[in-house]
Image (cartoon, rainbow, N blue to C red):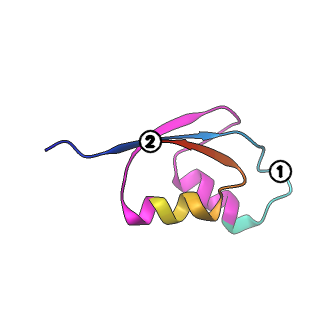
């Protein structure tokens, strides 16, 4: 059975954000604005996306 994937894209710069939010963005595998990552749809990843929702765009 194939796992569900989420495409997460950084749409806003991390300059001026909290240090732990920057670390969360890096943990999601995003480096610069408009970079994307395909991630497994797990509760941990969902929580990270929720934390930095104002910086990222998520497509299911």
Residue closest to the far right: 16
- Return the mark for residue 41: none
- Residue in the foreground of this view, choosing between 46 and 28: 46
Name which residue lies at 86% across and 56% down: 16
Q: Mark 2 sits on what residue?
A: 60
- Residue in the foreground of this view, choosing between 19 and 51: 51
Spot occupied by residue 41 in the image (x, y as percentages of width and height)? 37, 53
The residues colored magenta run 21-45
Decide: is 24 above or below 2.
Answer: below
| 43 magenta-colored | yes
Q: Residues within 10 Å of mark 1 (few under 14, many from 20)?
A: few
Spot occupied by residue 43 in the image (x, y as percentages of width and height)? 39, 65
- Return the mark for residue 15: 1
Name which residue lies at 13% across and 44% down: 1
| 52 magenta-colored | no
Spot occupied by residue 50 in the image (x, y as percentages of width and height)? 58, 62
Is 20 left, or right, of 40 in this rendering?
right
Of the residues under marks 2 and 1, which one precedes in the sequence?
Answer: 1
How many dots with numbers?
2
As helix, strand or loop, the secondary structure at mark 2 comes to: loop
Name which residue lies at 52% across and 51% down: 28
**Quadrant of the drawing holding the C terminus:** top left
């Amino acid at each position: 059975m194939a796992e569900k994937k989420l495409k997460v894209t950084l749409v806003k710069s991390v300059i001026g954000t909290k240090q732990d939010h920057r670390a969360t963005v890096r943990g999601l595998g995003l480096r610069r604005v408009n970079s994307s990552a395909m991630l497994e749809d797990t509760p941990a990843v969902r929580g990270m996306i929720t934390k930095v929702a104002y910086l990222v765009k998520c497509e299911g």
